[in-house]
Image: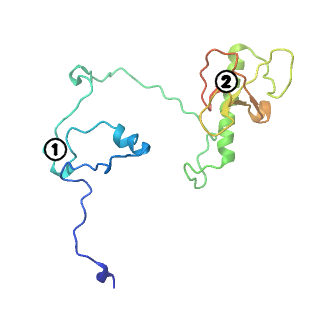
Amino acid sequence: MIISYYTGTKKRQLTPDSGVTKRHVGSARSISAQFSPATLSPSVATPSRKYSSRTNAGCIVATYGDPSKASWKANPDFTPKVKLLAMGGDKPLTKTYKYMFEKVRDAAEALDDSIDALAEQIKDSLGIEEFSHLKVASNENILVVGRICCDSVGRLNAASVLLEGSQETSFGNTVPVDLSQLSEYSLFPGQCNL
């Protein structure tokens, strides 16, 4: 049954052997045809050919910089300093674990731990007693710690910046951050800030 539909023709080549290009027929072209990627792209000097018919296989056709000036000598005196950080204590895994399939609760806890770890380091280095809750209204200056988040899907901008506190200090609450008085700033989603 299937053989009756077979035409017996060879497979069509995807890369043309000649440099024939398609052109729009007619004198009146639409606006979208005038500003399409095909009209705005630079023209190729040589038409594409089949990859298997290339004559320079194994040759270097382009380099970046001067490779003769690069120093490839090893430093035998270098010893990397590695510090092991235990994520789940010093205990090994006791049951099967699907890597990269962690639960949302576990991922949120890891992010929360990063805020708490930063808060502890800042407390120790600056001699701060406690951080305030994000949602506490105060007439005095307060110190809070949290992670930068975006209130919408898309790129972070001055109107969409939120600060999310940890579960320990702020019960995971978020507050909008007013950046209108700043002439410049540098923030990214996930950044921990004081």
| Apparent side of residue 22 relative to residue 92 in the rendered image (left or right) | left
Q: Indicate the quadrant containing the C terminus: top left, top right, bottom left or bottom right.
A: top right
Q: What residue is shown with label 2?
A: 193
Q: Is residue 9 left or right of residue 181?
A: left
Q: Is residue 34 above or below residue 114?
A: below
Look at the picture and state if 127 lies above or below 15.
above
Residue furthest toward the left?
Answer: 55
- Under mark 2, the amino acid is Asn
Report which quarter residue 2 is drawn in.
bottom left
Amino acid of disc 1 = Ala
Measured in 3D between alpha carbons, the distance from the residue under mark 2 to the one under mark 1, in whole angstroms, is 53 Å
Q: Residue at x 75, y 23 (%)?
A: 144
> What residue is shown with label 1?
57
**Quarter where residue 69 is shown:** top left
**Image location (x, y in percent) of residue 117:** 67, 28
Q: Residue 178 at what x, y percent from top left?
A: 72, 23
Q: Position of residue 136 (x, y in %)?
A: 85, 26
